[in-house]
Image: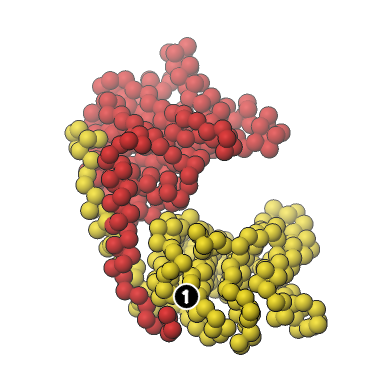
Chain colours: A red, B yellow
């Protein structure tokens, strides 16, 4: 299973993905679900993948190979808008699924796969897209300036309550990690380490990448404080005398 | 969509279900998803249903009709163990899906349906079961003394953190309603009113049934306090200086 989340704030963007993959409980390993296409001072494009790993890796490799082998054709390093970047990822996903999907279907293997694609290309503001398994895509809105991918539900309520474009990047990182903590508590197949990329608006620099391991003291403290805070929030609500006559 | 939850505590049981049904966004109405089979001083059996409404209503009607038409055959009012009650519901669900499923499948309509069945029969301790769409079932454990049905994920993290067999019934009601508040915030197709049944252990009395409407002052206060408490819990976590150099 996978959990990815990306937020677009006035101050920039935060991307995060877990790194757990499993094909059955006895075949667990770590993979990169965060792929960065960057050209210093020109573009930072981040793709977070979920779903069938052979499909998403195939798509990412095809995107990189096309850029290398036919640099004159529009590619991820030459498109001039994030919209075009999202379309390129969507079309590549369609190609790969068309080629591979039928073989997988014959064995009842799901070829579904999806991407969050976000970032900034010089001349444009940062933008964030969600690319569905069918290759179509949507852009984030200022009312809901985030997308999730994979095991999204456990970690969504806290984002719904806190997210706002005015959050600082540090607050958005905190929110992202709280959302991961909630997800990992309820679904053991989402696991550490977490890949984190922080993108300050207009920096056109992908330098702020972090891998949060089990030994990370901030993430552990965050988990403890969040758990205590939730329990305190629960305790702060009075019990309902009206509903329980004999309790 | 549906959300149901049932908890088994040392002090008794709490059952809750929403009442929203929809077949498309323009066909929304209220239905009972909580069905009570009770004989004063002898048994209280509660079934919470989720999934295809025609299937679950059909099953409940068949259970009631069998009890009425052939009272000498083992039925929901005569079985001597909650295990037998769960098996009866599971077998009935199998019958109904066998009869109806193929017709629905021809129109790509999902005939999936499931039940939480819990309660107490005189001579036994309270017991709680989850009956899957295929008619097989499992019983709750003391480590996880609750079951959810329907749209389960949004409201699960808070239960995971707080649940314990030693909760009082009033605390369990509070926990149930916080879980509903979280679910309804993230999925608008789960809606008020909530049907709530509180069962004190060994009472063999189904008298404590409540319908929580939008005007319910406790539920509204609970939603406000929980939201404030969550935000306070979030604020109480320091921001991560180490991950955000320029934010």
Per the image, label 1 sits on a secondary structure element best described as: loop
Chain letter of the residue beneath label 1 in the structure image: B
| Picture layout, residue B74 above or below residue A56 | below
Quadrant in the picture for residue A15: top left
Residue A135: percent from the left, percent from the top? Answer: 52, 35
Quadrant in the picture for residue B181: bottom left
Going 39% across and 41% down the picture, which residue do you hit? A5
Location of the C terminus of chain B by quadrant is: top left
Going 63% across and 60% down the picture, which residue do you hit? B138
Q: Is residue A190 visible?
A: yes
Quadrant in the picture for residue A18: top left
Residue that protrudes farthest toward the bottom in the picture:
B40
Residue A78: percent from the left, percent from the top? Answer: 38, 20
Taking B153 as reference, is A233 left or right? Answer: left
Residue at the disc numbered 1: B11
| Picture layout, residue A121 above or below residue B58 | above
Residue that protrudes farthest toward the front in the picture:
B123
Depth check: give the residue in front, A65 or A236: A236
Going 29% across and 26% down the picture, which residue do you hit? A206
Crowding at dot 1, Cα within 10 Å, few <14 / some 14-19 / many 20+, comes out as: many
Taking B217 as reference, is B193 left or right? Answer: right
Going 59% across and 70% down the picture, which residue do you hit? B127
Q: How many numbered discs, if any?
A: 1
Taking B100 as reference, is B40 left or right? Answer: left
Depth check: give the residue in front, B128 or A64: B128
Depth check: give the residue in front, A225 or A10: A225
| Picture layout, residue B78 above or below residue B156 | below
Q: Is residue A119 visible?
A: no
| Picture layout, residue B164 above or below residue A90 | below
Location of the N terminus of chain B by quadrant is: bottom right
Residue A57: percent from the left, percent from the top? Answer: 51, 26
């Amino acid at each position: 299973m996978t959990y990815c989340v990306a937020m677009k704030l006035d101050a920039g963007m935060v991307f995060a993905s877990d790194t757990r993959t499993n094909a059955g409980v006895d075949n667990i390993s770590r993979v990169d679900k965060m792929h960065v296409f960057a050209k210093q001072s020109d573009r930072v494009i981040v793709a977070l993948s979920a779903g069938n790993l052979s499909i998403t890796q195939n798509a990412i490799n095809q995107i990189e190979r096309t850029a290398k082998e036919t640099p004159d054709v529009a590619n991820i390093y030459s498109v001039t808008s994030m919209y075009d970047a999202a379309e390129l990822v969507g079309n590549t996903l369609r190609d790969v699924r068309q080629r591979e999907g039928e073989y997988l279907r014959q064995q009842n293997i799901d070829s579904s796969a999806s991407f969050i694609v976000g970032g900034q290309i010089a001349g444009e503001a940062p933008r964030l897209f969600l690319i569905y398994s069918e290759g179509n895509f949507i852009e984030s809105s200022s009312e809901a300036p985030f997308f999730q991918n994979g095991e999204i539900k456990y970690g969504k309520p806290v984002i719904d309550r806190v997210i706002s474009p005015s959050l600082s990047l540090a607050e958005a990182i905190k929110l992202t990690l709280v959302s991961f903590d909630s997800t990992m508590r309820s679904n053991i197949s989402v696991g550490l380490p977490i890949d984190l990329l922080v993108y300050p608006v207009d920096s056109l620099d992908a330098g702020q990448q972090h891998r949060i391991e089990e030994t990370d003291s901030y993430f552990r403290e965050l988990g403890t404080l969040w758990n205590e805070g939730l329990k305190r929030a629960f305790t702060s609500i009075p019990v309902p005398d009206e509903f329980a006559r004999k309790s």
